[in-house]
Image: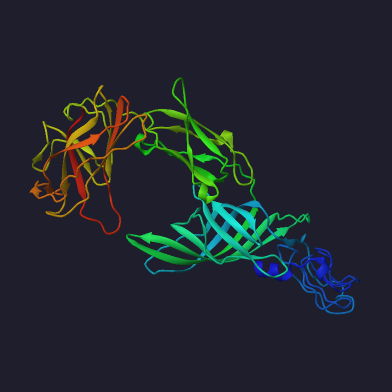
Amino acid sequence: MLLVMAACGRTDDENHGNNGGGPAGGSAGSSGGAAGGKAGFGGSAPGGASGKGGSTTDGGASGEGNAGNAGGSAGSDAGAGGTGSDFVPLGESSWDTTLALRVTKQDPTGSVHCTATSFTLHFSPAGSNLKVIGGRDGSVLKGELLRGTQSSPSYSVTDALPVPTRGDCNLNGIDITELTLQASDETGDGVADGIAGSGKARGNFILGDQGFTAELSFTLQGVPDSTKPSLLAPSNPHPLDGTRLRTTEPVALSSSVTLTPSGAGGASEPLTGYTATDGAFGTFSSPRILPFGSTWKLSATGGDLANLPFDSAALPSLAVLADPGVFAEDGFEGTPAVTLTGNANIVTSVGTLPAITGSKSLFVPSGSSATLHLARPIGANSVHFTGRVLTTVSGATVGGPDVEAGVIGGSLRVRPTQALPSTPTTSTNDSKWLYAGPAQEITLPLTESGTDVAIRVTSLGCMGICPPAGAFLIDDLRVE
């Protein structure tokens, strides 16, 4: 379609004949000559050679009038229907953009599914070229378009232009490598009111620990951005994750976002935009460790690159992970107040390996986590616990657990000051976790003031080429 538009997109002053391509959607076979669409070609002699009508986009269905002094006999169908358009240069503008994609080639081991992606594009003139900022859902991607030398304005890429993956794409990234883009002016006011193009792209995806590339072709359509930006909030974020909100599209650097606690009391928390060097913000964040179970209202000023303000009615609220309750610091002997995910559990043994202290310990295998809330006595400055690493293979080096703690209301996360032995050799006689390392005391220093501490124990999973799976046994957890 784009090639037809390029061929047919000349304005009236380029139809040099007396009766060449007439007004958009003109009738065929009139005495004045064959009337193609506005974007059609006429001849230089009266009546012209077979005048071509506009494309299906710009001048109706293409057709040809017969050659002759009067532009063809009555009834010939040159350029039936349509309104026609001119191609115009692009200025400062924002566009709601969709790529219709087709996979043309991929690695035999890959399985790429991708038919569409959508995002916002913002253009800013840079000489005769265009600076580009694109993005969606927290991503901000930059590039440049090069204007061609032909009289009908057209834009291409020299360096690959990254665009977000969205829709049904299972790709990690898409880079436009070839592009022909034009802007149309349907209203005739000299300002672009649509963009269209086509080209080729490279899709990137990962299987296991290997990266692969797929070749894509696409058509591009864009309409002026008329959608107000909003924010995307995570569901039940962990206090130790801090706050990270994504924008639905890139927003201006003058924008700001603030958290305000719901209910009485508490101070508002301004968030920091990331990052000014991108020319726009895609995320707003804060390292503040928010209280368990707290809820927050979002407010925002500014707006997107089309000067549309934030959609205040669509701003979500933020609800932090529910409080597991204050841990009793009795080991894990009673009914512990703890939030568990995956296969984490309170156990009496692992095979024939007993609990570290007393009759119960906390067990956190790969891909699982445990979250605890501890009260901090006056003068206490560190978290202590005893831990053991377990693995499936004797003598193998395994990744240690990720243990972090932070004072609620603070912004620092602290981790163990010493590593656990990572080559377990003690047999457990368990069917899976065959070997355990020695028990070791672990310390996490607390340097910020505050009366409550959040702790998360995670035994991370792995993709690709991974070391043997690991697990973690923990006991004697306390703040001193």
Q: Position of residue 280 (x, y in %)?
A: 55, 47
Q: Position of residue 86 (x, y in %)?
A: 75, 62
Q: Position of residue 61 (x, y in %)?
A: 73, 66
Between 336 and 133, the one nearer to me in the picture: 133
* Furthest residue in direction right, as rendered: 31
Q: Residue at x 24, y 23 (%)?
A: 379
* Furthest residue in direction top, as rendered: 264
Q: Is residue 184 left or right of residue 316?
A: right
Asked which quadrant contains residue 476, the reply is top left
Q: Is residue 231 left or right of residue 349?
A: right
Q: Position of residue 334 (x, y in %)?
A: 18, 26
Q: Is residue 425 above or below residue 237?
A: below
Q: Residue at x 30, y 58 (%)?
A: 464
Q: How many marks?
A: 0
Q: Is residue 394 above or below residue 258?
A: below
Between 356 and 99, the one nearer to me in the picture: 356
Q: Is residue 110 above or below residue 238?
A: below
Asked which quadrant contains residue 318, the reply is top left
Asked whether the viewer can see residue 1, the reply is: no
